[in-house]
Image (cartoon, rainbow, N blue to C red):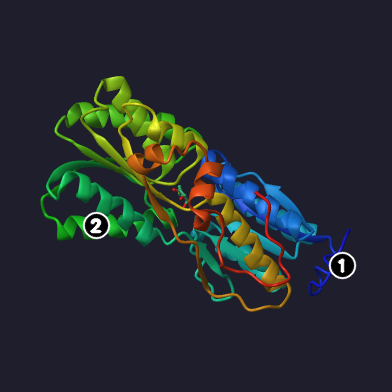
Amino acid sequence: ADGLKGAPAPFDKGGVKVALISYISAGDFFQACQAGAEAQAKSLGIDLRIFAGRQDAGEQREQILQAINLGVEGIVIDHGLPESLSDVVDQALAKNIKVVAFDVNLNNPKIPQVEQSDHRLAQLALDQAIKDNGNSFKAGYVYVAGFAPLDRRNEIWDKVKAANPDIAETVRFGNVSDTTAVTTADQAKAALRANPDISVVFAPYDEFARGVKLALTDLGLAEKVKIYSADISTADIQEITEPGSPWIATAATNPAVVGAVSIRAAALQIAGETVPQNIVVEPVLLTQDQLRSANVQTIEDLAKKIPAFSTSAAATADWIPAAAF
Ligand code: SR1
């Protein structure tokens, strides 16, 4: 394996094994996050072992044990259910394997936690919803409890409702599965038929937003109901900017950056350097109007228009080369 010139051990020799173990691999966000992790690993000469996530807590536990047996020096755990992970993660830490958690609360001071500032992300999307719709409307809300980012976004939704008593959550639905968008569309159709006075849907995950958009289009309600979401991808940009789209705004990071930051946090720890306990990648608000008027059609266009979108100063060091994505 080729070492990285000027890097601290063990990166100076190369061939450092790191595992990326995801709870979910399907969908644009997770694919882009993985691509960012792969690009950063390549730049560091890391031998990245990727374990596919199938929303299966038992399988994710097994994958952590497999990674330990492979002799990895670091593990990035990307989402998951904390109660099913803590004992196997403890086994990894006991073998001096460095662990990084992205969007899963492992509540261990030895494990840095990467997140997208979910409070800010939800606040950005909801501020825009209030700006566009006032503070008196009936809302649908898409939520599944138990996922750290969704739970953090939910805290802001609760605060916004408390501060604006005329914002009424009329219906709540949601699912996280390998068919999240399609299943959300079915749920949204039933919810919107039963609650025709809804004018706003807060759907803080792009798969949720896609599902709601599909339902609105099928029901002929795309002109009457507005969607506010989280996340962005090239496919999302196309759905947001197409004529007549009800998807009005989203608050998002570049998921490739989040993947890259997670790998850097693992690399820094492996090199014996200090990593903050909370590593935050800041989101930006992206509205339909802005994307259309700037003629943004892809994530690459977005990165060109907003340079901060494709970089993060989180978990960096002079010896870590930039990832190419
Ligand atoms: C099921 S959790 C989905 C969320 O995880 C990441 O934080 C993405 O932003 C996505 O919205």
Per the image, label 2 sits on a secondary structure element best described as helix
Asked if the residue at label 2 sits under 8 Å from ligand 1, the reply is: no
Instruction: Return the x and y of residue 107 as percentages of the image width and height.
Output: 49, 70
**Side of 263 where 255 appears, left or right:** left
Amino acid type for the residue under numbered disc 2: Asp
Q: Is residue 45 above or below residue 270?
A: above
Q: Residue at x 72, y 71 (%)?
A: 270
Q: Is residue 106 above or below residue 21?
A: below
Decide which of 132, 125 is in the foreground and name it. Answer: 132
Q: Report the disc number at residue 13.
A: 1
Q: Report the disc number at residue 248.
A: none
Instruction: Return the x and y of residue 205 as percentages of the image width and height.
Output: 41, 45
Decide which of 193, 262 is in the foreground and name it. Answer: 262
**Side of 230 where 86 appears, left or right:** right
Residue matched to label 2 = 158
The reply to whether residue 306 is visible in this rendering is yes
Label 2 neighbourhood size at 10 Å, few (<14), some (14-19), many (20+)?
A: few
Spatial CA distance of label 2 from label 1 is: 50 Å
